Amino acid sequence: MESTESYPPEELTNRSPEPSEDDSAEKPTHIRFLVSNAAAGSVIGKGGSTITEFQAKSGARIQLSRNQEFFPGTTDRIIMISGSIKEVVNGLELILDKLHSELHAEEGSDVEPRRRLRLVVPNSSCGGIIGKGGATIKSFIEESKAGIKISPLDNTFYGLSDRLVTLSGTFEEQMRAVDLILAKLTEDDHYSQNVHSPYSYAAGYNSANYAHNGSGGRYQNHQKEEAGSTVTIGVSDEHIGLVLGRGGRNIMEITQMTGARIKISDRGDFMSGTTDRKVTITGSQRAIQQAETMIKQKVDSASERETE
């Protein structure tokens, strides 16, 4: 969205030298990353005030996938920032600084925690980040001090040609890693073409489209498929509460978003030979797959916290 409002310049974090004024620094580029639905609302701000301010300050264009339209296999929305390298980095810095500050305030800790930033990168561009024998990604890790992991391509979702590049570390470490990765991606002429179809596979998954300020219509139900399939999975008794949620909130959310029917076995009714409760999912193959993914995410997030 083009903004006509002006804001006083804000001093950004003194992280690294400004990009040199050469062709690569001015070359149009973009970056995509995942945020929770709640974080997306924070970025948009009341009446779009925050995103308008961030666009004015950075000079970048900031777009979000519509409400309830997520990256396949997740419940996260996508933010795309486009412009010159400097504009994109400044826009990302403003967004992450706000999100990190809010989380920091909620947790009330004096020590900045290591957080995760998940970039969405075309599979065809990941080779440049990895480098021959992993040399490039190793150098990026050493220079930025951030953890950098590239997920395998998920063939579960038809038409998905993007992978997730997860950056872990402090705010400063993540931004140093972004500088390095974005500079490498911008060297790839094919990468810049993705700005015109940032979420092309979504039409077959959940009809997602990019919209200014995150505005979006009502969540679209999945197209009817042959229903009636049933899958039963096991969830440990100690984690079954995560699937249910307070007052059944989580299971209701999963049911509404996927269209699947979910039934959890009574206490003491376990999968054979285990202490895992039975979670029976009924619906189309797609609905079952999405419900399984959402259940796994809720359980995995708790397991990660327990091991930290």
Image: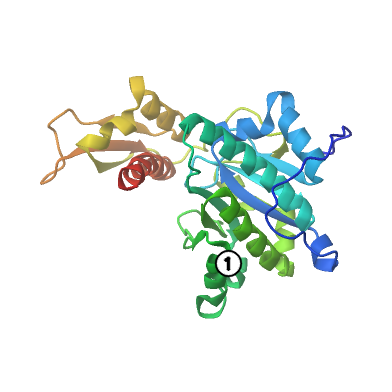
Quadrant housing residue 229: top left
In the image, farthest residue toward the top: 247
Where is residue 124? Give x, y as percent.
61, 68
- Binning the other alpha carbons within 10 Å of mark 1 as few (below 14), some (14 to 19) or many (20 upward) gives few
Front one among 6 and 188: 6
Secondary structure found at label 1: helix
Query: Horizontally, is 75 left or right of 19 in the view?
Result: left
Where is residue 283? Give x, y as percent.
37, 37
Where is residue 205? Give x, y as percent.
54, 45
Can residue 228 be seen here?
A: no
Can residue 270 be seen here?
A: yes
In the image, farthest residue toward the bottom: 132
Q: Residue at 55% of width from left, 56% of height from top?
A: 160
Front one among 229 and 127: 127
Front one among 226 and 27: 27
Query: Horizontally, is 110 left or right of 208 in the view?
Result: left
Q: Residue at 20% of width from left, 36% of height from top?
A: 237
Q: Please, what is the three-letter code of the amino acid marked with disc 1?
A: Glu
> Is 132 drawn above or below residue 18 in the view shown?
below
Quarter of the N terminus within the rendering: top right
Where is residue 51? Give x, y as percent.
73, 35
Residue that mark 1 sits on = 143
